[in-house]
Image (cartoon, rainbow, N blue to C red):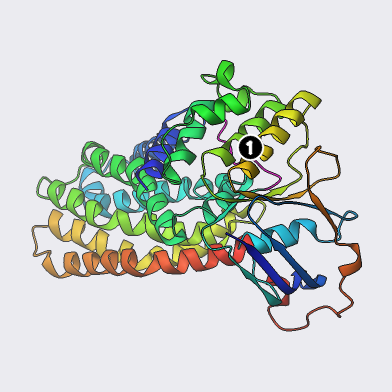
């Protein structure tokens, strides 16, 4: 399992691996928002938590279509399915590798990008906390979407259509934690719900992902 | 570990392709599968490897014993030859990749990226993966595609060594490998059943 994780991380960091793609997208999106909204720092401060969450979510989505499709194209998935690793752990490791190369960097740069959007000072901690708790769910749900569309040519668009609705609960509660934090209100209820969603998704979805992957490999 | 296939019916895309297939593969045995294009050789091998379910019949002795090699080699172009092999060796829990590099003459290429290899070299690397799996039954689908005569010889030697160690191999190929192998022509087992008409037939 560790071999699979290190292989995926290594592949992501090598040429054409797509590491940094999501980060660059996140950066550009947050730079563009003040241009489109106009130079009203009070308005930016109000929308900053939501925009940052939406940006992080879309950046996560960007690299999902390569998550399993590349392994399917070159036959690696067939070979992994006949290897001693259960497919459930294969998809879990893939989701973890996706989070480490996409989600975690987004969490780390979010405070820097918060400055661009005039995020109120109390919001920084809660933005990082909410992203840290919420982005693993994005990777795991995304892996499920990738497993559903794995054999399809140009499955990337369909993948987005399937995955985005499933991201809604995470987005609602994640952005709510960041917004309440920025406004100095209590955050424990949405944070607990966000953590609950993430925990449930991590516990259950790998089984669904492995099941659809088995069907798609036939 | 003996592989026993009894009364197997297999389908591809909802259409049964082969039916009533029986075979046994004992340790030390090699079985060459022949038949015209589209008869279902690949489907048969994928069913035996557990990648797709059979319509009816059973495959026994295939649990955790099969090393499958299909049309694609499962290589990552941005990893080196050594990294590709080491990955599979650690997935299957084996340590050294040196015997595999030696058997397929890959030592000089060890540090090259798999993306820079020729088609034949990639195939040699894909076949070398079989040696790091440590699995007793090799299920190989057209393993000699894009190999030159010398590489085919290397492959035949590797299979012979594997059989000598009590392993077995089931190979779909049309060239003569010079092995002491039984030949199974699957042509007579062509399915006469109608297409599956259940709801999920297309997924089977």
Q: Chain of mark 1?
A: B
Is the magenta region chiefly helix, strand or loop?
A: loop
Q: Residue furthest top?
A: B108
Q: Quadrant of residue A2?
A: top left
Of residue B30 and residue B202, the one placed in the foreground of this image is: B30
Residue B127 on image: x %, y %: 64, 37
Residue B90 magenta:
no
**Residue A124 x/y as whole percent:** 15, 46
Quarter of the figure with the C terminus of chain A: bottom right
Regarding residue B78, the answer to whether it shows in the image is no
Q: Nearer the viewer, residue A193 or B21?
A: B21
Q: Is residue B163 at least partly visible in the picture?
A: yes
Q: Residue at x 26, y 38 (%)?
A: A109
Q: Is residue A180 above or below residue B194?
A: above
Residue at (17%, 52%) from the top-left corner? A129
Could you tell me which residue is drawn at 58 percent across and 62 percent down? B62
Report which residue position mark 1 lands on: B161
In the figure, residue A215 lies in which quadrant? bottom right
Which region of the structure is painted magenta?
Answer: B70-77
């Amino acid at each position: 399992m560790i071999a699979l994780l290190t292989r995926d991380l290594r592949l992501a960091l090598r040429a054409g691996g797509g590491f940094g793609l999501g980060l660059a997208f996140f950066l550009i999106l947050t730079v563009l928002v003040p241009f489109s909204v106009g130079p009203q720092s009070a308005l930016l401060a109000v929308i900053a938590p939501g925009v940052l969450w939406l940006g992080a979510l879309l950046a996560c989505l960007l690299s999902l279509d390569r998550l399993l499709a590349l392994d399917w194209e070159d036959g690696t998935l067939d070979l992994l399915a006949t290897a001693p690793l259960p497919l459930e752990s294969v998809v879990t490791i893939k989701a973890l590798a996706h989070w480490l190369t996409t989600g975690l960097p987004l969490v780390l740069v979010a405070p820097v990008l918060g400055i661009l959007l005039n995020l109120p000072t109390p919001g920084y901690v809660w933005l990082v906390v909410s992203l840290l708790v919420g982005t693993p769910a994005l990777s795991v749900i995304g892996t499920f979407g990738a497993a559903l569309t794995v054999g399809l040519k140009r499955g990337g668009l369909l993948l987005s259509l399937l995955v985005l609705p499933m991201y809604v609960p995470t987005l609602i509660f994640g952005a709510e934690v960041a917004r309440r934090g920025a406004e100095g209100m209590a955050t424990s209820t949405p944070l607990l719900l966000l953590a609950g969603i993430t925990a449930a998704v991590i516990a259950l979805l790998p089984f669904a992902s492995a099941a659809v992957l088995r069907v798609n490999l036939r | 570990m003996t592989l026993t296939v009894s009364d197997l019916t297999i389908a591809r895309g909802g259409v049964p392709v082969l039916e009533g297939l029986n075979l046994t593969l004992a340790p030390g045995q090699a079985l060459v599968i022949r038949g015209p294009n589209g008869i279902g050789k690949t489907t048969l091998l994928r069913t035996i490897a557990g990648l797709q379910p059979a319509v009816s019949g059973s495959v026994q002795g295939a649990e955790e014993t099969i090393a499958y090699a299909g049309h694609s080699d499962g290589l990552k172009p941005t990893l080196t030859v050594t990294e590709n092999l080491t990955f599979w060796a650690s997935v299957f829990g084996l340590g050294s990749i040196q015997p595999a590099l030696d058997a397929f003459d890959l030592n000089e290429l060890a540090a090259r990226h798999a993306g820079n290899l020729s088609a034949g070299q990639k195939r040699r690397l894909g076949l070398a993966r079989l040696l790091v799996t440590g699995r007793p039954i090799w299920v190989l689908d057209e393993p000699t595609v894009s190999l030159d005569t010398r590489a085919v010889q290397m492959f035949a030697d590797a299979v012979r060594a594997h059989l000598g160690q009590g392993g077995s191999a089931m190979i779909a190929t049309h060239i003569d490998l010079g092995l002491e192998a039984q030949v199974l022509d699957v042509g007579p087992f062509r399915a006469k059943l109608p297409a599956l008409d259940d709801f999920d037939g297309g997924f089977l």
